[in-house]
Amino acid sequence: GQSLEQPSEVTAVEGAIVQINCTYQTSGFYGLSWYQQHDGGAPTFLSYNALDGLEETGRFSSFLSRSDSYGYLLLQELQMKDSASYFCAVPASGGSYIPTFGRGTSLIVHP
Amino acid sequence: DVKVTQSSRYLVKRTGEKVFLECVQDMDHENMFWYRQDPGLGLRLIYFSYDVKMKEKGDIPEGYSVSREKKERFSLILESASTNQTSMYLCASSVDRGSPLHFGNGTRLTVT
């Protein structure tokens, strides 16, 4: 099966940079995804890493190290609207590719 | 933009009632999913479907069933609601296996 570990909460101030880590255990690896969920809202897809390295999309970047079974989401120039929960997810092994989600990290951005 | 619509935002039901949660997607996606979300537990997969009339159990299927008679619609059924099924229920769809999931806004179900 799969398991993912991520911090339950991270706090930061506006304008800062924050990193949300995710370590995973999976019998087969098909990539690491990140989703954002605002309070009361639907999770929305942010990024996907299948290969090692950094993927940048605007203020958000995602990093993967397959040898370390580790990834992170990097948020730069934090804004108040970035306050949300962030979930890492890995597809299931065995060919189904159904995402298994971590328990989520609550990011609180202070003025 | 993909739209995944869940029929109810909030539902209150009594213990023992049969409950239907409906989900419709408008992008002709093959795959549809039902998750429940509880504080501190993240998203847990209940059931998923790869095609019409197909269904597969997820991680926590006990107490639930599903129906997919049409490609765009995936229903979650609680045969006899219990208080431990009080939760946020999220429906999602994806164009194919491995593609990002598109979620609906969720149904917050309270069973009293």
Image (cartoon, coloured by chain):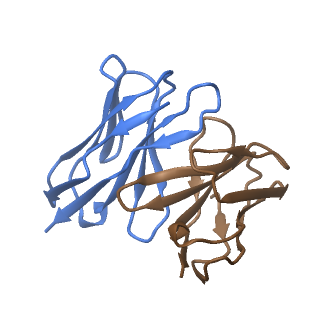
Residue that extends furthest to the top in the rendered view of this protein: A67
User: Looking at the figure, which quarter contains the N terminus of chain B?
Assistant: bottom right
Colour blue, chain? A
State the count of labels.
0
Answer with left or right where residue B55 lies relative to residue A68: right
Residue visible at 63% across and 54% down? B62
Q: Quadrant of residue A64?
A: top left
On screen, residue B39 above or below A63 = below
Q: Is residue A32 above or below residue A81?
A: above
Q: Position of residue B22 (x, y in %)?
A: 71, 68
Q: Nearer the viewer, residue B98 or B67?
A: B67
Colour of the chain lettered B:
brown
How far across and how far down the image is residue B51, in percent?
Answer: 80, 45
State whether residue B87 appears in this view: no
Q: Nearer the viewer, residue A48 or A27?
A: A27
Residue at position x 39%, y 48% in the image: A87
In the picture, measured across the screen, residue B106 lies left or right of residue A68, that is right
Where is B77 relative to B100, above or below?
below
Report whether A93 appears left or right of A104.
right
Image quarter for residue B8? bottom right
Q: Nearer the viewer, residue B68 or B71?
A: B68
Position of B17 relative to A106 (above/below): below
Image spot of residue A19 (x, y percent): 22, 43
Instruction: Tell me, yes or no, if residue A59 can be seen here.
Output: yes
* Percent x, y of residue B14: 61, 82
